[in-house]
Image: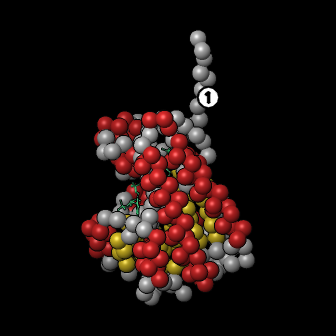
Amino acid sequence: MSNTAFITGATSGFGLACARRFAAAGWHLVLTGRRSERLAAIADELSSQTQVLPLTLDVCDTDAVQAAIAALPAPFNQVRLLLNNAGLALGTEPAQACDLNDWKRMIDTNIGGLTSVTHALLPTLIAHGKGASIINLGSIAGHWPYPGGNVYCGTKAFVEQFSYALRCDLSGTGVRVTNLAPGLSESEFTLVRTGGDRAAYDNLYRGADPIQPDDIAETVYWLATLPAHLNVNQLELMPVSQAWSPFSIHRES
Ligand code: NDP
Ligand code: 8X3
């Protein structure tokens, strides 16, 4: 059976780095995202290393997700790895100042999109059996709340618990499930979150030596190629520069 990885959100950041890492190892790739031009350029870049199927897909469009996955041609229909990576945060304001539409979009993408892609690919992954993996991009935000994290933190907590519960249901199928939960990582994520605020981006990463997308790609490749009898349930990663703070205490005077 061929090795095919289905990567959501392959147009930048972690997804793009993973596409390059798996292409270098000769995996066939289904690369998805909304930005078609980027997908075409990536497919072109990787075509000398492996077979690539670029799929313009909004993970929030359930009908499109189901149709695209049902129509996958060989060898792309023999998926061994589903990397549920597409996701976003919008805003850093306190809950009482947030736009409800931003909350809905995070829920639709990080929860709705992830669950519909998973649902559509489960039969294929189960057919692959031993050695197949679902790797879900959670976050430290799903474990540790922080001011302005509100719904983003909530969506990533969902990803963690969904990953564990999936493992229960997939017991006996050979399909592995991992919640990969990185901390501070440098990518377009922060530009998306801040509406393109380059100064906020520079300020967040300045002097912090954050996780890089290539670090995540190496980790995902390791997870997906571990011996088939091993399941990493949860992997939380932080840059060495990042640690916890004390609880805040609001005092009346
Ligand atoms: P990027 O912004 O660089 O990449 C996000 C990817 O998600 C893009 O390829 C984007 O593609 C895709 N995407 C977003 N919305 C949709 C959608 N509706 N349909 C399809 N694709 C979509 O961020 P990262 O690489 O940093 O983030 C990847 C994942 O990792 C996210 O789930 C994020 O929450 C998580 N994460 C990020 C951390 C960080 O600090 N950067 C830390 C922990 C977790 P396009 O716009 O072309 O659709
Ligand atoms: C992204 C990491 O700390 O910005 O998931 O929420 S954080």
Q: In this view, does 238 lie to the left or right of 25?
A: right
Task: Compare residues 90 and 207 and report the one nearer the observer.
Answer: 90
Q: Which amino acid does label 1 sit on?
A: Pro
Q: Mark 1 falls on what kind of element?
A: loop
Nearer the observer, 94 or 188: 94
State the residue position of label 1.
246
Q: In this view, does 167 lie to the left or right of 33?
A: right
Quadrant of the image containing the N terminus: bottom right
Q: Measured from the top left, where is residue 12 in percent x and y?
A: 36, 59
The quarter of the picture where residue 60 lies is bottom left
**Residue 36 location, quadrant:** bottom left
Q: Where is residue 88 in the image (x, y as percent from the top left)?
A: 44, 53
Q: Pinpoint residue 126: horizontal percent, then vertical percent.
A: 62, 80
Report the front residue among 41 and 218: 41
Quadrant containing ligand 1 reads bottom left
Q: How crowded is mark 1: few (under 14 residues within 10 Å), some or many (20 or more)?
A: few
Residue at point 59% right, 71% down?
133
Above or below, 236 against 29 in this view is above
